[in-house]
Amino acid sequence: MNNNDLNDLVKTQLDEEIIDDENKLDEIVSMENILSSDSDEDTEEFEIGYDDYGNMSREKLLEKFKEYLANYSLPASKQHLEAIKEAFENIKSEEEEEIDKHYFLDSGVVSDLPLDPLQKKFSELLQEYRSKKDHEREQIEEEKERNLKAKYEVIESIKDLINRQESLNNTFQEFRELQHRWREIGPVPQTKLHDLWETFNLHVENFYNYIKINNELRDLDLKKNYEAKINLCEKTEKLLLEPSTPATFNMLQKYHNQWREIGPAPKDKQEEIWERFKAASAAINQKRSEYINSIREQQRKNYEAKCELCEKVEALVNEEIVSPKKWKARSSQLIEYQNIWKTIGFGPRKENNQIYSRFRKACNKFFRKKRDFFNALQEELLNNVQLKTELCIQAEALKDSTDWRKTTDEFIKIQKKWKEIGQVPIRQADALWKRFSLACEYFFEQKHSHFNQIDKELEINQKKKIELIEKVKNYKVSQDGEKSFNELQDFQRNWAQIGHTPIKDREKLANEFRSLINKQFDKLNLDEGNINFQKFKSKLENWKVTKQFNEKIGLERIKIIQKLKQLETDIVIWENNIGFFIKSKNSDALVRDFTNKINIGKENIKLLNDKLNFIDTML
């Protein structure tokens, strides 16, 4: 076989191997598309940080954020920075809630939200972080463009290898160096990747076609490629022993990139080695899918649990709460829901921020309602302080009064008003009540003391009147009517001068005295008018001890005036009649009769006037 035939055979074999490897490459690219469809989205979502940021203070989180930002590249630190950011904002919200929970103090003083220098510093670092991300993104894009340009330069260099007059070994070695250089160049823009590989493969194929490499060199190259692919298979199979994490999957992608960079293997080994690599990749992909599905299922359960908590908090928000005690109970309930929320993991990425915002919105609305309630309550309490202070002033102004009945009524009114006024701040309640009660107690103690003294005087008066009743009962009327009359009048004057007795037996004693004194007057040899007047005086004296005295004596006065008017009218008529009868014959008896009536009427008028005068002295 001549050299031309050998070269044609080698070219044919190379064509078949390149075509077969291109088919494998298409299959690899297809698999990578499937695998990578979740990778960018899930890597960040499922990555677990090295530090438990949820248990750190805001000061420590600020320090960690600053450390990662200053000492690490964004690709290496992005997950940590985002986790720190979320932890910091959650703690800030919780601290604000704590202020809301204790917004209304026992003293009735509302606390203002404190200044937050940590938040200001963290906001500055976030701005630096965003600027750095924007800058690094620009650098990556610029780097990809430079890499694209560099890879096209490699392609141009491969094109330059064609038609060289150097030894085959030197040319092939330079080709290998160009391949190595190609692999060393970093990523290029995704939109240019397909065309780039199309061009590269085309010129590699042209190179192989041009140099018409001999079988031994080609076999050696294929053997090296085969060994490199076996090594990749072994590395890929070891990944099956690792936990299914984003890092494991990222490593698989790197191995796929390396596979792509390695040239074709011997034709009789190509299918075998590819099936081995594909099986290991598929197993890792299946493990990865199961891991992602389990995470998503757990996230779905977390989301449902968080939805339930949101509904409970929203129910608290919609509840009508009208007492501080009930607000305290509902606040404790809400804090319990918040603690439960912290124990629940993340929900699905698309819903996680949404459900968190819903929960935060409901919590904030609850505490705003609580703040509004206690603001209104504080205003009411302060108004109640003013009202009760005014009642204290009124009570203090009345406490020295000796107008016992009127002042007692006033105290009863202001005590009723005090009860109708609502609560005051706890720290002022005792002082106000002590001030008010001291004024009330002072007045009623003075009143009690006063009436105790009166009760003693009434008891003394009662003894005196009982003794006087005994004297009247044992009194013996003498033959000297004038003397007895004066002594009986002295008894009446003494009775009036003694004063009031306890109300329980007051009327009974008065009736007994009047009955006895009237009997004594009846024994006297006095004219009817005088006796009548003395009995009248005794009756009025007895009335003085009754509650209806003013009413009775008023009616008695009206009755006497009516009798006076009637008598005066009758006397005028009788006098006219006498004048008429004098002119008549045989009228002496009638004149005497009317004259007698007129005299008696005038005596009665005098008696009635005496009674009126006595009534006036008692009014």
Image (cartoon, rainbow, N blue to C red):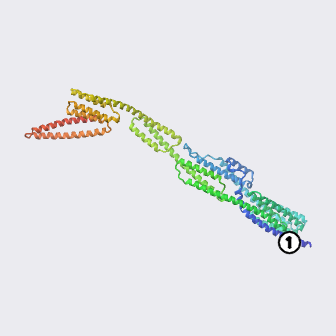
Determine the residue located farthest toward the right in the rendered image.
2
Q: Is residue 277 visible?
A: yes
Q: Is residue 619 visible?
A: no
* Element under disc 1: helix
| Residue at the spot 26% in from the left edge and 39% down from the top edge | 556
- Horizontal side of 50 relative to 393 (left or right) equals right
Q: Quadrant of residue 490?
A: top left
Residue 101 higher or lower than 229, as above or below: above
In x, y percent, where is residue 455? Answer: 38, 33
Front residue of this view, candidates 449 and 394 = 449
In x, y percent, where is residue 351? Answer: 64, 59
How packed mark 1 is, by other alpha carbons closer than 10 Å (few <14, some 14-19, many 20 or more), is: few
For the N terminus, the image quarter is: bottom right
Front residue of this view, candidates 10 and 329 = 329
For the C terminus, the image quarter is: top left
Q: Amino acid at mark 1?
A: Thr
Number of marks drawn:
1
Determine the residue located farthest toward the front in the rendered image.
474
- Horizontal side of 220 relative to 396 (left or right) equals right
In x, y percent, where is residue 2? Answer: 92, 73
Residue marked by disc 1:
12
Front residue of this view, candidates 112 and 10 = 10
Front residue of this view, candidates 451 and 73 = 451
Q: Quadrant of residue 348?
A: bottom right
In x, y percent, where is residue 249? Answer: 75, 59
